Amino acid sequence: MLKLNAVSSGYGDVTILKEIDLDVGGEVFAVLGSNGAGKSTLMKAVAGLLRSQGGTISFEGRDVTRTAPNKLAEMGLAIVPQEGNIFPDLTVRENLSLGALVGTRPRKARMDEVFDLFPDLVPRIDQKAGSLSGGEAQMVAVGRALVQEPRLLLLDEPTTGLSPKYASSLFRKIREIHEQRRIGILLAEQNAVKALEIADRVLVLSLGAIFLNEPAKGIDFDRVRAGYHI
Amino acid sequence: MIDLLSGYAIFSLSTVLVFVALATLLHLQFGLAGIVNFGVVGFWGLGMYAFGILLLNFQLPYFVALILAVAIVALVAFVLGWVVLDLDSQAQLVATLAFAAVIADLVTTEKWLTKGVVGLGTVPHPFGGAQSALWLLLILLVLTVGVIVYARLLGRSPFGRLLAAIRDNEVLARNLGKDTSRAKLIFFTLTSAGMGLFGALSAPVRQFLTPDLLGPGVTFSVWIALIVGGKRWPLGGLLGVLLTIFVFDFLIETYLRVPSDWAQIIPILKLMLYGVTLVLVLLFRPFGLLGDRRQPTSHL
């Protein structure tokens, strides 16, 4: 579904990601690593928000290395960035409806599916997204991306700042989304333990390079942890 | 008693309507889409002069000149927007302000085309006859109401929500599947062309065009009116213009009976009241008198 071939990326002249090779199928693919390991840079590079400094990215067989973010959204790729992932001045309903700028199914049906998944949002429907709690805002962000009906969903540290209860609930929902919709999910996470519980495959980044890329099932956690101590 | 059919009253009401339209168009640009346009008078003045020049210098038919004048404004807005719209708001402010200053300067210096400070005239009304000014007022009324209705409908449409999303968080809006730069450019071009249309229709209201009409006071008046009324509301421009330009420039300045000794004080007092009103609104109602209430969205 998503293939990266020797992709390097970063900010200006600074290279963060160094020649990453990756092959993501229709699975929950966890990207782990310490702060500064390059998780967010990887997500931004895939979503077209950062120019890659080298290598090629392809999505469903098409080269998308220099494709604009809006074109990627049309092709079926949605991202929930770590920060600034809602429109704070718009209501919950408006935030979700913006996801329907792509796709052909009726907007209402798509939004109703999100409300089924996140029933806590129903009483907040006409509330400004900027006035929601962190957990509710994250539901809106994920919900908006789901209304886009992506085939690959990028989630950049979606549990950052959430209480353990909200974080656990969101992890369960992410797995539920994958199983119900059969979409690929690329999940960047700090919480390695929880991410491994729901992931099919795990990538550990360390200093912008791949430290480990293996199936999540039966993985030796000490080896994952070692990627955080380089 | 105010005679609403006197020549001066029709002139003043026509001017007020033009300001309502400009403030509503600015609501669309700034309140809805977050585009900072401090060159309102530039688009308005370009439309006015382009129409006057095409009509008087080139002898084009009335409505051909009108359409061409609006097309010229649209073209200039497209080029300016293409350069500045993806820059930050401060850059937009400076660039649009400079654009308006350039238009005012060109109108003054290019005497072969504009007759400079001597002035260009006389621009006739679109329809002849004794009631020609009244017809023009009615045309302005219909068009201004049209702009307000358009603003209300647009705010509730998918394109309107996309513009609001761009205003709120453009980086995220780029991931919604629409080209945000193109959406802003199209919208800026159309709304600025709208300002040009009201400029062109101001030419027969003014009849005699001089460079002093293109001072920054027009832009500032429109901005103050929108901020006072409420930038987020389609009716914000109307309310703001009624409370500022209509009250100060029309009612007080024209109809308030004051001792002759005070006559010179009124314009100064007007500017002071303008300032006080603006400061009070910003202090106590930063989103304008209509506030930050949102339009009902239950139909979405």
Image: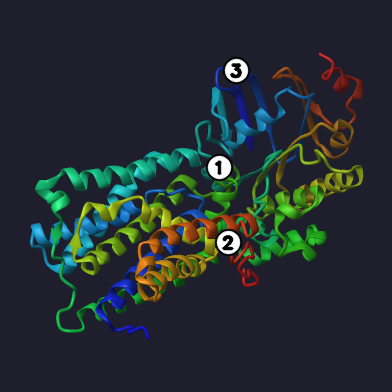
* Distance between the alpha carbons at the discs numbered 3 and 1: 25 Å
Mark 1 belongs to which subunit? A
Residue A18's x, y, as percent? Answer: 64, 18
Crowding near pointer 2: few (<14 within 10 Å), some, many (20+)?
Answer: many
The secondary element bearing badge 2 is classed as loop
The quadrant where residue B136 appears: bottom left
The quadrant where residue B122 appears: bottom left
Crowding near pointer 1: few (<14 within 10 Å), some, many (20+)?
Answer: many
Query: Does residue B79 appear in the picture of this structure?
Result: no
Query: Does residue B196 appear in the picture of this structure?
Result: yes
Q: Is residue B82 left or right of residue A123?
A: left
The secondary element bearing badge 1 is classed as helix
Q: Is residue A41 above or below residue A181?
A: above
User: Badge 3 is on which residue?
Assistant: A14
Between A104 and B42, the one nearer to me in the picture = B42
- Residue lying at 28% horizontally and 73% vertically, measured from the top left: B11
Mark 3 belongs to which subunit? A
Between B245 and B100, the one nearer to me in the picture = B245
Callout 3–callout 1 Cβ contact below 8 Å: no
Residue B272's x, y, as percent? Answer: 48, 57
Between A86 and B131, the one nearer to me in the picture = B131
Residue kind at label 1, given as amino acid type: Leu
Q: Which mark is residue A72?
A: 1
Q: Which mark is residue B288?
A: 2
The quadrant where residue B68 appears: bottom left
- Residue lying at 36% horizontally and 66% vertically, measured from the top left: B261
Q: Is residue A125 left or right of residue A90?
A: right
Q: Is residue A69 above or below residue A150?
A: above
Q: Is residue A134 left or right of residue B181?
A: right
Residue kind at label 3, given as amino acid type: Val
The secondary element bearing badge 3 is classed as strand
